Image (cartoon, rainbow, N blue to C red):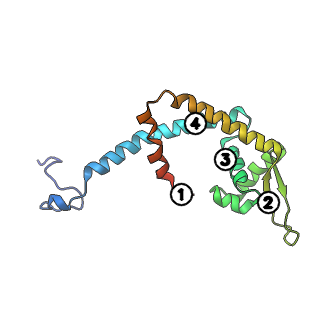
Amino acid sequence: MPNATDTPAHGQSADASPALEPNPTAETDALAIANQLRPVLLRLHRFLRGEAHELGVTSTQASLLAAMHRSPGVGLSELARREHMSAPTLVGHVDRLEAAGLVARERGNPTDLRRVGLTLTPAGLEMLQTLRARRTAWLTARLEALAPDELAAVAPLRRLTEGES
């Protein structure tokens, strides 16, 4: 009975030349790294998300505050598209943020009263700044324990998301 090393890989002929074969080591390494990295990133996200909860907002609401800060006056539809959520879900979050005094809805276009722009209130800006400071402090405390060569891993991680929206 042939073993796995005796049979060609899916899509390869038995006489394929080594120069034409894909590099299985690179695929395996990337897959192994992805399997190790994914749970680490999820745990980091969970820890950082906890900082928002301690301040009384959800991580989704914190993300919305940051998005509104980057684009003052953004409309509901545009924000829902950017944040990859349905309009009804977004409206529920915005309603809660507005009730908490963190967001204001503004009708800035007198010719289109349907258009509502979203902006942070001073309390919303303070919440966002406090949250960023707490998250940065939490992360800084952990990064200080790493060696310089370990810290150099940030650059390639940043490249993973360049061009993503």
Residue 97 point in image, percent of width and height: 78, 46
Query: Tag 2's secondary structure?
Result: strand
Q: Residue under circle 3?
A: 63
Q: Does 10 appear above or below 4?
A: below
- Indicate which disc, 2 or 3, sits on the residue closer to the N terminus: 3
Inter-mark Cα distance, 2 to 3: 17 Å
Q: Pick whichever, 86 or 163, lies toward us.
A: 163
Of the two numbered discs 1 and 4 on the same chain, state the one appearing first in sequence: 4
Crowding around mark 2 (Cα neighbors within 10 Å: few <14, some 14 to 19, many 20+) is many
What residue is at 70 percent from the left and 58 percent from the top? 79
Is 114 situated left or right of 138 in this image?
right
Q: Are marks 3 and 1 in contact (CB under 8 Å)?
A: no
Judging by the rendered image, the residue that carries numbered circle 1 is 164
Specify which label sits upstream in the sequence, 3 or 1.
3
Q: Position of residue 147 (x, y in %)?
A: 43, 30
Q: Nearer the viewer, mark 1 or mark 4?
A: 1
Q: For the residue marked with disc 2, what is the amino acid? A: Gly
Tell me the tag on residue 117: 2
Q: What x and y, as percent, mark residue 142?
A: 53, 29
Nearest-to-viewer mark from 4 and 2: 2
Residue behind mark 4: 46
Write the residue at 77% across / 51% down. Answer: 94
Q: Nearer the viewer, residue 109 or 113?
A: 109
Q: Quadrant location of residue 117?
A: bottom right
Describe the element under mark 3 as helix, strand or loop.
helix
